[in-house]
Image (spheres, coloured by chain):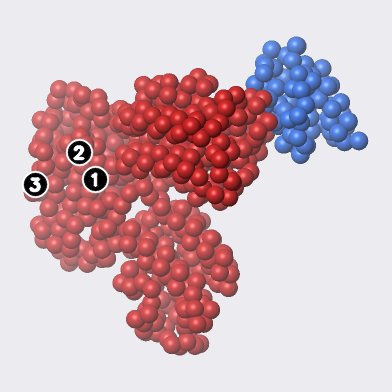
Chain colours: A red, B blue
Amino acid sequence: MRLVEALGIVKSAKRRDADPFSVFLATGLNPLHLSTFLAAELSQAFADRKIELQHGLYGDLLGNVSRLAKASAEAGIVLLEWADLDARLGIRSSSAWSPAVCNDIVATVKARASQLQPMIEAAAQRMPVMVSFPTLPLPPASFVPGWQAGSLEIELNGIMHSLRSKIAQRPQVRIPSAQKLEMVSPLRERFDVESELLAGFPYRLPHASALANLLAQLTRKPNPKKGLITDLDDTLWRGILGEVGVEGISWDLDHHTQMHAFYQRVLAALGAEGVLLGIASKNERALVESALGRKDLALSSDVFFPLEVSWGRKSDAVARILKAWNVGADSVVFVDDSALELAEVKASHPDVECIQFPTKDSTAIYELALRLRDLFGKSAILEEDAIRARSIRRSQESAEAYQAANSAPANFLEQVEAEISLNFSKAPLDPRALELVNKTNQFNLNGKRFTEAAWQNYLREPDSFLAVASYTDKFGPLGKIAVIAGRQNGTELRIDAWVVSCRAFSRRIERTCLQEVFSRFGADSIKLDFVKTERNGPLRQFLEELLGAAPEPGCVITRQLFESRSKDMREPQEITNG
Amino acid sequence: MDEMEQRLAACFVSVLPDLSPDEIRDASASTVASWDSVATVTLLAVVEEEFGISIADEDPARFDSFKNILSYLQQVAR
């Protein structure tokens, strides 16, 4: 991004009539153009919010990080550069260098790191904190030549590495990838000597832009995609299966087709992380099954579900896969070597991200792997990620069982031996709860999203409550699949957030969750912060059935009404922290 | 306005958005309230970016008006 573009974005975003999103930037350097880039990047990342960027005082790194810990912000950014850790590592200092001074610099930086750690950890208890470690080169303070890593460089990097390792263990601390930054902003093109001398701003504009982009992405933490649909011929493997046969396709060094094995390994990794993998291929099914049975495949063919193999249109195959997965098209990536097939799918499913597989360009395949990592990457693997693929497979059996039961929901739950457990504990905060609230669209009370800081502040209120429901049945566990958050005022409850995972709401557990909330709080009525959204049709349908009329904002469910319409409900099997 | 003036005027608009189009050509640090030291540094950075030049070695105080900056750019272009 150019500075003039950033200024334009900031100017236009200032006119937004939206809730503020406050970010505190704690650094010792003069943030100058970095502030502009950061405000612009954040304005783009949070298009529905008005960005407020708070600063501390120039030259006061520790004071500013300390202020961050007390700031009323929704996110914090700590930006470290060598000169902020010890002024002698900057060019504005007049202090002489010597071997003894270098030792003292190491001691000073070590002491600074020790002071910073608890401050950053304290801030991270209140909000997500992005911590950027020094991005600029060290000055020639050491006696060793530039091509040798001297003790000063090694020790200083060791101190930073140690601090990074310690704070990275905190769930709300996020650290930008040095490798990613190096790719977009090479080290030798970062430092602006003149600007540092003139204004105390040490970054060249492209570096400030790249750093701001990375920090904004970390702050935004976009929802990862959920599923990948891949083509087979000239994509998962090299060759046209129908022409060359099972033994004729390849993915190895001998045939110069190793990058297909690399792609298979990437898919294997995604599958192991809980990403749904499906196949859409124009082929003969029996041939495909034989090919997927080859022992030298770099991933188990079991990771793919469903296999849509036919001579029909790819868009129809994609539609069937989306239905089987029960996920939105916007959370799915389709990879195919044919531009025509991609265009055909895109025309029918505009929200699906369609990516061409660059069959004969190994470097581009490598780049594709990096792109897939960004699209599907997540900060941590949760229990639900591990069981997602299995539970979707089982949901097919479950759906068949439901149809076979052809009975009331309660009977269905009994027949499938359903166990629903509700956990009402607010501490420690379950990251899955916020993930569900922010990712769920269909069974979602109002579509409202929370930042981590806003979610934490909400649940810190003494009158607020949180219920996280887990589900398992004879087909296997689904993990944590529903969240209800609200406030209690005597016998009146207000529900502000209510979501049920798309993998679970066909199991009719919604009433059970609601019943348990009534029961736990002895409530006479529950007021719902309902808002109609483009995609919460299933939630509206449920409420309409319950209320006997289309739901309105602020609609109320009384206990009497609920009980009269829910006589066939089944009690939860187990209540955690009840 | 010639092309160089128009490009410079666009730089001024991005950094000093309160300036009206009529005021840009006569703008100077002494007459525009929002033209402070930060605006000077930002303006120079935007001008460098727009014209692909480096003016870091020059005295920033020299660039205290639209006319002075335009004059500098015309000199560099010769």
Residue holding disc 1: A482
Q: Is residue A225 left or right of residue A206?
A: left
Q: Is residue A19 above or below residue A567?
A: above
Amino acid, disc 3: Glu
Residue appearing at x 76%, y 29% in the figure:
B57
How many marks overall?
A: 3
Mark 1: secondary structure: strand
| Residue A540 in view of the camera | no
Q: Earlier in the sequence, mark 2 or mark 3?
A: 2
- Which quadrant of the rendered structure holds the C terminus of chain B? top right
Q: Position of residue A191 (x, y in %)?
A: 62, 38
Amino acid, disc 1: Ala
Residue holding disc 2: A467
Q: Residues within 10 Å of mark 1 (few under 14, many from 20)?
A: many
Residue appearing at x 14%, y 62% in the figure:
A474
Pointer 2 with pointer 1, Cβ within 8 A:
yes
